[in-house]
Image: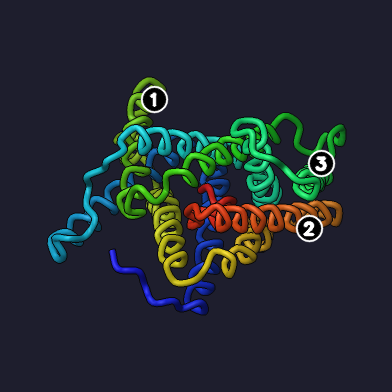
């Protein structure tokens, strides 16, 4: 695949679209749960949509350009493990959003870059500087300000974004080591396919009848299911394109606009804005997470490892 000519401004515009897509998808998931759409159906539909779209995308691309990346993968175990980790992360998001406001959920999930630092120290035994540890502590302090344990605001539901962030951090550690081995478009297909295949027996065992549910659904509900699948799939596609047009260091600061986008959509759709203390927590998480992601990027560049995944450290939808 020929690298795209650098176009930083277009890359930034695509990143703005990416964070809007993911904030919009999270808002749609919470709204769909309020309309009594089965969470399992929304989750399965999101991955099935991606698998089918990427199947068509890669098929047409190969017909027009036989040398283009296709469906063949040299690392099936990597694709399976990567897809399973992202599916688990998405499951935490889809179920957690039924209990937590979108902005607060998004902010807690933005702990991923500092959790990557923790995993690098604990699992890979990489040295961690005092600055990195300070950023880890600062980000967790921000999360505590958002959660406010003992206040009764969210209770046990905060486990969803915390577990999801840890799962996605594991996903990022794996991907950062292996991202250069496959075409990102081929990997994007397998991400959807693995999720759809793994969820199929779970849907069957749950007793959910997808066809009967869809036949009984209102047109608005069907449109919402398609919207969730489209926002997740196109959000990741635009992320791939943005990373081909601008350096990760240029795009990284715009990732944290997802918190603001989530708060704005929460106000427009649910007539709810986070309180003042939540915004203080958002600021701490954003500052520490962005600094951690930048240090991860600089370390990857120094080690001459692939850095294309650094910007997506916080984008797990």
Nearest the camera: 5 or 267?
5
Q: Which residue is mark 2?
A: 283
Q: Which residue is mark 3?
A: 144
Horizontal side of residue 41 vs 101, given as left or right: left
Seen in the picture, residue 178 relative to 53 is either above or below; the reply is: above
Q: Tag 3 or tag 1, which sits nearer the N-term?
A: 3
Q: Secondary structure at mark 2?
A: helix
Q: Tag 3 or tag 2, which sits nearer the N-term?
A: 3
User: Do labels 2 and 3 touch, CB within 8 Å?
Assistant: no
* Residue in the picture at 24% in, 50% down: 55
Q: Which residue is mark 1?
A: 202
Tell me the crowding category of disc 1: few under 14, some 14 to 19, or many 20 or more residues within 10 angstroms, Cα based: few
**Quarter of the image where one finds residue 249:** bottom right
Nearest the camera: 207 or 284?
284
Residues under labels 2 and 3: Cα distance?
A: 12 Å
Residue 22, percent across and down?
A: 53, 56
Q: Secondary structure at mark 1?
A: helix
């Amino acid at each position: 695949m020929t690298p795209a000519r650098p176009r930083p401004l277009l890359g930034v515009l695509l990143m703005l679209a990416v964070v809007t897509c993911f904030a919009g998808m999270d808002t749609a998931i919470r709204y769909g749960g309020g309309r009594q759409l089965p969470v399992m159906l929304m989750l399965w539909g999101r991955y099935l949509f991606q698998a089918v779209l990427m199947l068509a995308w890669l098929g047409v691309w190969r017909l027009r350009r036989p040398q283009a990346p296709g469906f063949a993968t040299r690392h099936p175990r990597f694709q399976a493990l990567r897809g399973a980790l992202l599916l688990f992360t998405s499951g935490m998001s889809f179920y957690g959003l039924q209990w937590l406001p979108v902005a607060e959920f998004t902010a807690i999930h933005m702990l991923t870059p500092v959790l990557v630092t923790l995993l690098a120290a604990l699992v890979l035994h990489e040295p961690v500087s005092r600055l990195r540890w300070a950023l880890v502590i600062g980000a967790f302090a921000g999360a505590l300000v958002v959660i406010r344990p003992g206040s009764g605001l969210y209770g046990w539901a905060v486990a969803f974004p915390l577990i999801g962030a840890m799962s996605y951090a594991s996903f990022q550690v794996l991907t950062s080591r292996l991202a250069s081995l496959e075409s990102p478009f081929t990997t994007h297909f397998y991400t959807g396919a693995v999720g759809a295949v793994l969820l199929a027996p779970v849907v069957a065992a749950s007793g959910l009848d997808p066809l009967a549910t869809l036949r009984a659904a209102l047109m608005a509900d069907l449109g919402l299911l398609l919207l969730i699948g489209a926002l997740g799939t196109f959000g990741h596609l635009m992320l791939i394109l943005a990373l081909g047009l601008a350096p990760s260091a240029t795009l990284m600061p715009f990732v944290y606009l997802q918190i603001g986008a989530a708060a704005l959509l929460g106000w427009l759709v649910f007539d709810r804005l986070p309180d003042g203390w939540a915004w203080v927590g958002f600021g701490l998480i954003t500052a520490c997470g962005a600094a951690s992601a930048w240090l991860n990027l600089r370390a990857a560049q120094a080690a001459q490892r692939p850095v294309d995944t650094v910007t997506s450290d916080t984008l797990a939808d």
